[in-house]
Image (cartoon, rainbow, N blue to C red):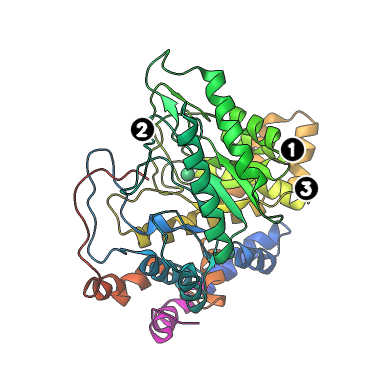
Amino acid sequence: MRRLISAELVSEHNESKIEGLREEYDALGALLSSRGIDIESVTSQAKEFAVAVPSWGTGTGGTRFARFPGEGEPGNIFEKLEDAAVINQLVTCTPKVSPHFPWDSVEDMKEVRNHADDLGLLFDAVNSNTFQDQPDQKLSYKFGSLSHVDPGVRAQAVEHNLECIEQGKILGSTSITLWVADGSNFPGQSHFQRQLERYLESTKIIYEALPDDWQLFLEHKMFEPAFYSTVVQDWGTSVLCAMELGDRARSLVDLGHHAPNVNIEMIVSRLIQFKKLAGFHFNDSKYGDDDLDSGSINPFQLFLVFNELVDAEQLQRDGFDPAYMLDQSHNVTDPAESLMSSANEVLRAYVKALLIDRKALSHFQEGNDALMANQCLKSAYEVDVTPILKMARYQKEGAIEPITCFRSSMYRANVARTRAQPKVGGGGIV
Ligand SMILES: [Mn+2]
């Protein structure tokens, strides 16, 4: 496996930190032991955790107003994979990349697979794009794609999804995520029911074309780019469509795609209960779909989501196998640093959820002891698990402090010398 940051640099970084880390780790080990928790077992679970990186997240995102790309950003799928490999080398929990087509399409997708193999990366869900027009495209998606009133546009959008599956097969993916921008901007513009019927009709063709070991993930989003209505606007519509399609269709939860203050952890619980949880697009949000870095605004909510996930994992719920991915728009940071920080925050939420005393929690729940039940959750949330995250990375030959190590490697400045100048300008919401 090719490493883009020298192993010597990473081990020098670790050498300077390991002594302090051992002390912190032992102190935390003693605290956890007093609660009946074996730190080594938690660390080994942390080492197994993985969250995928979106290929598009390796570049600067943007808003409707502007995009401010940084020097040395990746300009194609090969460079995106290189950045993803650096991220995984340092954080050790992001071994998969989720590609987006046609952005990541090349003549011979086998070359992409080989490049990823060489870098020690695998592929997560493939993503189709029917929310913008491509230069050589026959019909426009201005008024929708899979639910468009024109059967020709719907057929074109279906065809694109089938091509995405073919490309995904070459890459070794086993799922496709559908997010469509279809909706309306004016009351009266679209007939809600007929629009959803057309969406389902198109989606059924995609579902039928899935290889036997593939799943179809349906991603809902409340608003944007359509600002009055969206065809798959919430988890209710998403799960109804998934139920209509069949067992291999499930609902994907993007944390930013809900109204403010929605109880997302409860949605997660419902989807688990009915075997309809596809997985996640992790990010954070303050007002709407802000696409902010995971754990940067509301880390407690992220913890509560993982409380549900760990509960299902420990109960070994039938059919529970969610796909974890980051989906953020990095506007003011180096995308690699944001992705490293976010992978760490998602892992942190998972590890904290592992510390919850579920027997005690259940006891308080059954006894209607609301206050103690809440304190039981909080006592896990309040533990600083940083030493476990660091030790998990150290034991997997990653970096104890990934962002510090990344900066000292000068990776970005080095690739900026050979990569094409980034394009400045227009909006770039993805
Ligand atoms: Mn998403």
Residue 388 position by quadrant: bottom right
Residue bearing the label numbered 2: 142
Residue bearing the label numbered 1: 273
Q: Is residue 393 left or right of residue 137?
A: right
Judged from the image, the secondary structure of the residue bearing numbered disc 1 is: helix
Judged from the image, the secondary structure of the residue bearing numbered disc 2 is: loop
Q: Are marks 1 and 3 in contact (CB under 8 Å)?
A: no
Q: CA distance from mark 1 to mark 2?
A: 37 Å
Which circle marks residue 317 in the picture? Answer: 3
Write the residue at 64% across / 32% down: 241
The tag earlier along the polypeptide, 1 or 3, is 1
The kind of residue on which mark 1 rests is: Gln
Residue 108 location (% of width, % of height): 45, 69
Q: Is residue 93 left or right of residue 9?
A: right
Highlighted range, magenta: 1-21
Q: Note whether ligand 1 is within 8 Å of mark 1.
A: no
